[in-house]
Amino acid sequence: MTSPHRQIATLFLALMAATAIAQQTPTPRTLILIDPAHGGPDPGAKLADNVTEKSLTMAFGARLRALLTTNGFSVMSTHEADPTVTFTTDQRAEIANHAHPTACLILHATNSGNGIHLITSELPLPDDTYDPDAHHPIPWNTAQAASIPQSRALANQIGLALIHTKLPVLVTRASIRPLDNLTCPALAVEIAPLTRDDDTTPVTDTNYQQQVAQAIAAGLSSWRSRQLADTGAGATTGASR
Ligand SMILES: [Zn+2]
């Protein structure tokens, strides 16, 4: 027979456990940094008679920002309006790294290819001697190396969300700036026209852009949930399921 003392102790421990779950830190703020590529004297590609890549990436960035905000993300852009002077990739990387975002998305658009191209850095992964907690200076040209596993996981989650929306996806690697200079999980998202059944939707189509933005937001949400579950910060959410 269980003694009353033992019963009280068990009840007390159960209460302590319940309190511990309730007191867990709330979900950390998730800041997404968006970098609409090109701008100012650099128009990027000409996508239609009156549409340059720089105007499309700005418009798509605003569309994505609205959706991400609705989904509970904090969002920041490297620039809110078309820059009047040259805005270098180094300047963009400095703004991004200073903000310490949870993830960075660099936006491009093109008239060649089909669907969405997701590009992560092709820098070599850091070797076994790399200690992310050591406060050594981060080399500018290979700043992204330490984040590559996270960046690839992010590209996979966004890729899955796009495939779920039945949009063609090409996941690839390239060393492009400012991707290699970023210290957070990062990828470049390049929107190409959508060709299906001999029918082509141009990148300027706003319904198509909205579909892409919705899939990116869904992919970011699932990536973030997995990330929080891995670090234990999502335990409260997990326990209530
Ligand atoms: Zn571009």
Image (cartoon, helix red, strand yellow):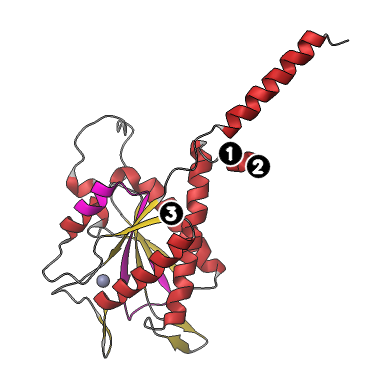
Residue carrying label 1: 236
Give the residue type at disc 3: Leu
Say the numbered circle drawn on residue 154.
3
Q: Quadrant of residue 45?
A: bottom left
Query: Under tag 2, what secondary structure?
Result: helix
For label 3, the crowd category at 10 Å Cα-Cα, with few meaning under 14, some 14 to 19 and many 20 or more, is: many
Dividing the image into 4 quarters, which one contains the C terminus? top right
In the rendered structure, are the residues bearing label 3 and label 1 in contact, judged by CB atoms less than 8 Å apart? no
In the image, which is nearer the foreground, mark 2 or mark 3? 2
Q: Residue at x 13, y 74 (%)?
A: 41
The answer to whether 239 appears left or right of 8 in the picture is left
- Above or below residue 5? Residue 16 is below
In the rendered structure, are the residues bearing label 2 and label 3 in contact, judged by CB atoms less than 8 Å apart? no
Could you say where residue 196 lies in the image, as x and y percent from the top left?
A: 50, 83
Query: Residue 100 in magenta?
Result: yes
Ligand 1 neighbours mark 1 (CB distance < 8 Å) = no
The answer to whether 2 appears left or right of 152 in the picture is right
In the image, which is nearer the foreground, mark 3 or mark 1? 1
In the rendered structure, are the residues bearing label 1 and label 2 in contact, judged by CB atoms less than 8 Å apart? yes
The residues tagged by marks 3 and 1 sit, at their Cα atoms, a distance apart of: 23 Å
Span highlighted in magenta in the image: 94-117
Q: Nearer the viewer, residue 43 or 27?
A: 27
Q: Residue at x 21, y 58 (%)?
A: 92
Query: Residue 5 in magenta?
Result: no
**Label 2 or label 3, whichever comes before in sequence order:** 3
Could you say where residue 59 lies in the image, as x and y percent from the top left?
A: 33, 74
Query: Under tag 1, what secondary structure?
Result: helix
- Above or below residue 3? Residue 59 is below
The residues tagged by marks 1 and 2 sit, at their Cα atoms, a distance apart of: 6 Å
Q: In the image as oriented, which residue stretches furthest toward the right?
A: 1
